[in-house]
Amino acid sequence: MSIIILGIESSCDDTSASILKDGVLLSNVITNQEVHRIYGGVVPELASRAHQQNIIPVVHAALTRAGIDKNELCAIAFTRGPGLMGSLLVGTSFSKGLSAGLNIPMIDVNHLQAHVLAHFIKENIEDNNQPNYPFLCLLVSGGNSQIILVKSYNDMEVVGQTIDDAAGEAFDKCAKVMGLGYPGGPVVDRLAKEGNPTTFKLNKPSIDGYNYSFSGLKTSFLYLIRDELKKDPDFIENNKNDLCASLQFTVVEILMDKLRKASKDLNINEIAVAGGVSANSALRKSFEEHAIKYGWKIHIPPFAFTTDNAAMVAMAGHFKFLDKQFCKMDAAPFSRVVI
Ligand code: KG4
């Protein structure tokens, strides 16, 4: 019998539902919440209200696109955490209601593990590009920057992580200083294509092990702008592309320096990248260069699986379904949870 899983993702500001049949993607519907754009960041209260409005139409669309009737579902996998509590509550409560109504099991999923497991989603039946264990996964998003040693789908160890800001936060905060709107990462990526990455020298941290730090870079970027604006009020406008290129270059260097060190020390050449920042074109290019130079076997997700999406939640749910790891009806979301 086929395993058909409905995945539900509502940890932040994307409402998403997906159907996976035996690990093969049938649908992945994502609704972004435009309501936050004017505030320059996600407003938790507004996010939960928007999830409440979106969740039923999104699930309906996922079932329709997949050509699956709700009575064919084997289980519902939902993001239990980490994330915004109000947002998580919408997905969790919806999953409870539907699983009780359909009398099928519920599977709780760790959002960070789901990002890593996105690499196992088969886009079609012939898709055989999944990583082999053990592999290292660089998880880079708005809230996380981690190097994860993935020993199996249910055995992951964080070997390095940021001690302050995440990489996505560094992009977003520096973009905000330049007045580029929110989220700034994709805009920086676009403008950087026209800029010179070596024009401005920005701070790189020197911390031990495989940990990251981005607060020094952020501060050096801020001071550079502050000092230059005193001399030229149009400094940002006149140097936007070079500023973006230099910022992006430095973030990617910081990320790759530690990843290279972890790969060498742990003797693992199978390397994946996940999370929203994995959409960054310079980071992707650097992965490809490392594959050539260091013989890495790299795994870069399709764009649809870089951002928050329910397909990765359904994938994690699929693995847990095989192990019969279901959760109880009293499962409550966690706003903070480690891998
Ligand atoms: O994983 P994700 O979608 O969600 C959260 O962490 O909530 O990651 C979002 C982050 C944001 O900081 C955004 O600016 C960043 O990913 N991002 C990018 C790019 N696309 C998204 N950063 C740099 N370059 C991009 N192309």
Image (cartoon, helix red, strand yellow):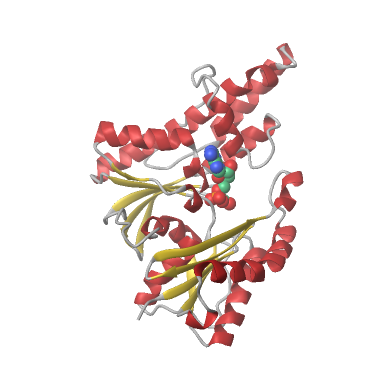
The image quarter containing residue 98 is bottom right
When the figure is inspected, residue 306 is found, relative to residue 291, above or below; the finding is below
Q: Closer to the camera, 215 or 49?
A: 49
Ligand 1 rendered quadrant = top right
Q: Indicate the position of residue 243 as horizontal and vertical percent values.
A: 59, 23
Q: Indicate the position of residue 102 as horizontal and vertical percent values.
A: 55, 86
For this view, does 148 lie left or right of residue 145?
left
The image quarter containing residue 25 is bottom left
For this view, does 309 lie left or right of residue 339?
right
- The residue at the point 54 percent across, 19 percent down is 200
Indicate the quadrant containing the C terminus: top left, top right, bottom left or bottom right: bottom left
Q: Residue furthest top?
A: 231
For this view, does 183 lie left or right of residue 6?
right
- The residue at the point 50 percent across, 75 percent down is 68
Indicate the quadrant containing the N terminus: top left, top right, bottom left or bottom right: bottom left
For this view, does 244 lie left or right of residue 254?
right
- The residue at the point 53 percent across, 26 percent down is 193
Whether residue 206 can be seen here: no
When the figure is inspected, residue 332 is found, relative to residue 309, above or below; the finding is below
Q: Closer to the camera, 108 or 3?
A: 3
Q: Indicate the position of residue 206 as horizontal and vertical percent values.
A: 43, 31
- The residue at the point 47 percent across, 44 percent down is 278
Q: Closer to the camera, 25 or 102?
A: 25
When the figure is inspected, residue 72 is found, relative to residue 275, above or below; the finding is below
Whether residue 285 can be seen here: yes
The image quarter containing residue 32 is bottom right
Total labels drawn? 0
Q: Indicate the position of residue 131 as horizontal and vertical percent values.
A: 30, 54
